Amino acid sequence: MISRNFKNVLVVSIGFLSLFTAYGGLQSLQSSLNAEEGMGVASLSVIYASIIISSMFLPPIMIKNLGCKWTIVVCMACYVSYSIGNFFPGWYTLIPTSVILGLGGSPLWSAKCTYLTIAGNTQAAREGKKGSDVINHYFGIFFFIFQSSAVWGNLMSSLIFGQDTKIAEIPDEQLQTCGAADCGLNVTSNSTSTRPEQQLVWTLVGSYIGVGLLAILIVAIFLDNIDREQASQFRGNREPFCHTFLATFRLLKNWKLLTLIPLTMYSGFEQSFLSGEYTKNYVTCALGIHFVGFVMMCFGATNSVCSFLFGRLARYTGRAALFFFAALTNFACIIALLFWRPHPDQLPVFFVFPALWGMADAIWQTQTNALYGVLFPRHKEAAFANYRMWESLGFVIAFAYSTFLCLEYKLYILLAVLVLTVITYPIVEYNEYKNPTPPVEEGTYLSHKEAIQADDNKIINQTQM
């Protein structure tokens, strides 16, 4: 039988799968679906700007007071509000719901990462294994299931939008502007990128709302409240509010965290490029919006499978080898995208880039999350809040310049951040190799009853008084 911790990992993973089937599908379509005045990209910028703000303060407060489970449930409801806002998209619906989603985004991911780290350390202590190996394994399973959300969310959009009767041929004049050949700022102004029929949009968004609500129910009903006693103890003590409120900032005194900032920001840059720039300037421009879902499905499928494989492979190769493999893959893709001129006759090529990107992203996601869990086991909430904050800053910067910088310059910026990451990351890895961070002892995560039972097992002889 599977362990209770493993069951909880599956529940968290399936909950996130359902939630991001909706959000991931909407994010991939924003730059093309709500292209008027850059409204879709603007909403994404607001989301990640709000995540930065929430990362500064909310995760430690929510997680320590509510516990990981109920933090996840509350924040999932924030994500569903964004789907509701897309039902009648406009500045007065998208922007407020983007703010709500952003405020819930950082606590959601911090709670998830904290939960998996606690489960991994607890299981490792019980089985006598290395904590980092079990954490890596759990994150690999999570991202294997979670990343497949891109498949299902985009499959829904492709099948629904594929029923559109207004799909038109792409004129040669527009094909000349696709990719990095032209500036790429006016792609969606062409008539061939017309928004699908409103009835189809309502059908899609309504489906996304449904799977989002399903995610909330799955977590609320089936997930164990693994840190309930820690949350109760925190609420019962009189620790100053400002101590918890500023936990995210206090961790910035740690030089390891500062050195990881380029790696963390690059994660935001590379994800935003694929979902915002590649879908608009390559796929929508040369094939049409109805192909976006199919292309992103390829990314999601590759990402999902590779997340599982690399989560298990890391124990044999180490993190460093995987990180440099991901960097090399992204470097090759960026150089190729600078020179590639997309054309409908080259249909297989449109799927090669997201497949390679998904393979690299699987490494960035699984290994960076696991790295934070290994380096900061005693400050998990603040560490993962910093992770979301800096990753979101990468998203914000990328989406902010999306509407006024030419595609060629965006690729150069992405390349520069990648190079900086390759320079700074080895410093942290070398120091961790020389001075390993000691893991948290099992007793930290056990309930009072379990701790007593664990102590009883160690007693050789006892005389009753």
Image: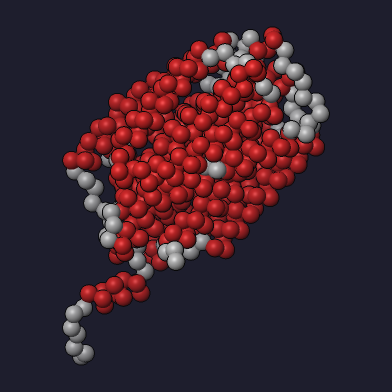
- Where in the figure is residue 212, as x and y percent of width and height? 63, 49
- Where in the figure is residue 422, as x and y percent of width and height? 32, 27
Q: Quadrant of residue 404?
A: top right
Q: Is residue 28 above or below residue 242?
A: above
Pick the front one: 157 or 241: 157
Asked if residue 324 lies left or right of residue 142, the reply is left
Q: Is residue 351 above or below residue 174?
A: below
Q: Residue at coordinates 53% horizontally, 26% vertically from top-left?
A: 352
Pick the front one: 237 or 80: 80
Q: Residue at coordinates 44% horizontally, 63% vertically from top-left?
A: 2
Q: Residue 62, can we see it?
A: yes
Pick the front one: 60 or 446: 446
Image mark count: 0
Asked if residue 124 lies left or right of residue 167, the reply is left
Q: Residue at coordinates 19% horizontally, 43% vertically from top-left?
A: 435
The figure's colour scheme reads secondary structure
Quadrant, the N terminus: bottom left
Q: Residue 55, can we see it?
A: no
Pick the front one: 445 or 42: 445
Q: Residue at coordinates 24% horizontally, 47% vertically from top-left?
A: 437
Asked if residue 391 lies left or right of residue 169, the reply is left
- Where in the figure is residue 71, as x and y percent of width and height? 50, 55
In the orientation shown, which residue stands out farthest toward the bottom?
465
Q: Quadrant of residue 326?
A: top left
Asked if residue 422 lies left or right of residue 25, the reply is left
- Where in the figure is residue 441, as x and y percent of width and height? 27, 60
Q: Is residue 454 above or below residue 87?
A: below
Quadrant, the C terminus: bottom left
